[in-house]
Amino acid sequence: MSSPIWISGGTLIDGTGAPGRRAEVLIEGDRIARIAEPGTPAPEGAEVVDASGLVVAPGFIDVMSHSVASLLHDPRSLGKVTQGVTTEIMGEGWTPAPKVACEPHGFPIHGLPGGDERWAERSRGWTRFGDWLAAQEEVGSAVNFGSFLGGATVRMSAKGHAQGASSPEELAQMRRVTREAMEDGAFGLATALIYPPGSYASTDELVAVCEEVARFGGIYITHMRSEGEGILEGFAEALEITGRSGARLHLYHLKAAGRPAWPLMEPLIERVNAERAAGREIYADMYLYTAGGTGLSAVTPPWASEGDRLRERLRDPEDRARIRQAMLEPDGTWEPLGNLAGPEAVFPVGLRHPDHQPYNGRSLAEIAQERGQDWIDAALDLIEQEPEWVGALYHLMSEENIERQLREPWVMLGSDAAGYDPAARTDGGTGGHPRAFGNFTRLLAHYVRERQILSLEEAVHRMTGLPARHLGLEGRGELRAGAFADVVIFDPATVRDRATYPDAEELSEGVRDVWVNGERVLREGEHTRAYPGRRLYHLGAAQPAQHA
């Protein structure tokens, strides 16, 4: 067993929201053994870590991670660990397990880990949700990890990419997949209701599936069907799904997307607070940027992707004309992100085609002008001609709403991004956005130190104790005797995000040391290549005993 660790001289912010205080922290094995009064002598034989002038806090929890493939390829999760993140929770929309018959492997959205074809063959044998997380356990991880079950994965298990209502037999299959995932430790069901084929699910279908989630005390966590002008209707559907099924409710990346929707954030917050006052358990996460990041294909109507045939349809003149007309005059039944942002605020990233390399990071309006095209035609050409999925940044949100949302005590942080090393990047589908490298440190630097929207203690609570309690992560999220030793030491005067939209892959500064389960994974800002992270289970699941 390694020597005890004595963290001395720091300001303890324990994750509960209580005022910071001077204290000494003793780590023995994987636990916090003692919180001692300042000046208490270090135990004999302990490694003394001087934290004078620094903050000692619980490790941060990312409740909306996309490290599905990147963590299997590179378990360091460097971009997250250097922000102080010690736990990543994945699952929005798609998970690689259980493998669905209509896909060649388990990673059609996130991409094979490191492009390694061996994962294609291995993932074909993942018949249950837990098989993927067991594979991650074998690989190892610097961070703790867990996941929701992807809603699109559930639907594809029974209906593939097809639209239409589910038959009783198909619905029974969806319920079985969900029940098995909850038994394997999934935290609940995670939907992304603007993306096909998950968007094809009806309210009644989602209620039926969430009944299985509710049996385990799980959470329905959702990218709502609308975050634009239909955001209140999207929230009403989420309330109906959880009200009828009994599952708890969490809203992914809380935002009002598109200028017409900005005034709707206040009534949405009022509605959430009214429901919470009436006894409903509702939480949300957010990232701290005015641009969202997703696929460039989100500019097209969902029906164009039915059967996973978007590129095929774009090569057919008649189908392409239909898609173009739907983008030109959206009918209100889908979320047209290109129209909401406008071509001057859509920035394709990750373009791989040799002819498209000069377009990376430039606006769709600029690209269209250079090509002598309308923006719609330019976007459709890029989607059709690129060899793989294309990402894009959509500048849709207002800074005023970000600050307003942060003031609500039920809001926590989620990066909506993968954790990876920018020097050895593997595209997990969400690269090219600064939130991957700065969401957590940006809270501490910009919204605490500069804007003073939150106190330092409250900000730490939002990243630690609040998500841990909400997700049922026993023994995590707080620094107290007996808790797991997920610990971060940072300098409150210098911690900051360095990633920007033009230079999105810049590591954060000011986080000095990080421990996960009592083992140091960041020492003086340098990754130690230790992989002490553990698989986390929802409390309703049968799970192995944690190491003492």
Image: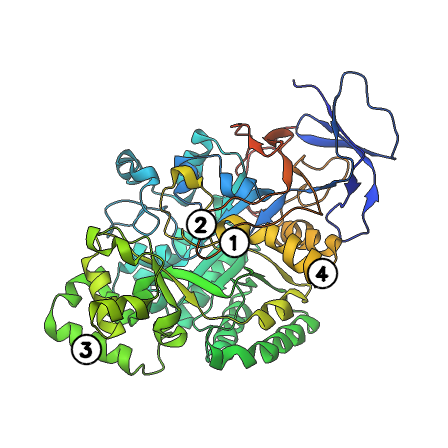
Q: CA distance from mark 2 to mark 1?
A: 8 Å
Q: Which residue type does callout 4 highlight?
A: Leu
Q: Earlier in the sequence, mark 1 or mark 4?
A: 1
Find residue 61 and report its horizontal and vertical position in percent. Answer: 59, 47
Residue named by callout 4: 454
User: Residue 325 sits in which quadrant?
Assistant: bottom left
For marks 1 and 4, give the CA distance: 18 Å
Q: Residue at x 42, y 35 (%)?
A: 74
Mark 2 or mark 1: which is in front? 1
Helix, strand or loop status at disc 3 = helix
Q: Is residue 485 left or right of residue 357?
A: right
Give, as a three-letter code, the residue at label 1: Ser
Number of residues whose C-alpha sits closer than 10 Å to that of mark 2, classed few (under 14), some (14–19) or many (20 or more): many
For the point 53% across and 45% down, which residue is it? 88
> Which tag, 2 or 1, sits closer to the chain's start?
2
Q: Are marks 2 and 1 in contact (CB under 8 Å)?
A: yes
Residue marked by disc 3: 322
Query: Between marks 2 and 3, how big is the CA–CA gap?
Result: 33 Å
The mark that comes first in sequence, 4 or 2, is: 2
Label pair 1/4, CB-CB below 8 angstroms: no
The quadrant the C terminus occupies is top right
Q: Earlier in the sequence, mark 4 or mark 3?
A: 3
**Left of 36 or right of it: where is 382?**
left
Mark-to-mark CA distance, 1 and 3? 35 Å
Question: Is 545 above or below relative to 48?
Answer: below
Residue type indicated by callout 2: His
Per the image, label 2 sits on a secondary structure element best described as loop
Whole-percent x and y of residue 182? Answer: 48, 49
- Report which residue position mark 2 lands on: 66
Residue 260 point in image, percent of width and height: 48, 82
Mark with earlier residue (1, 3): 3
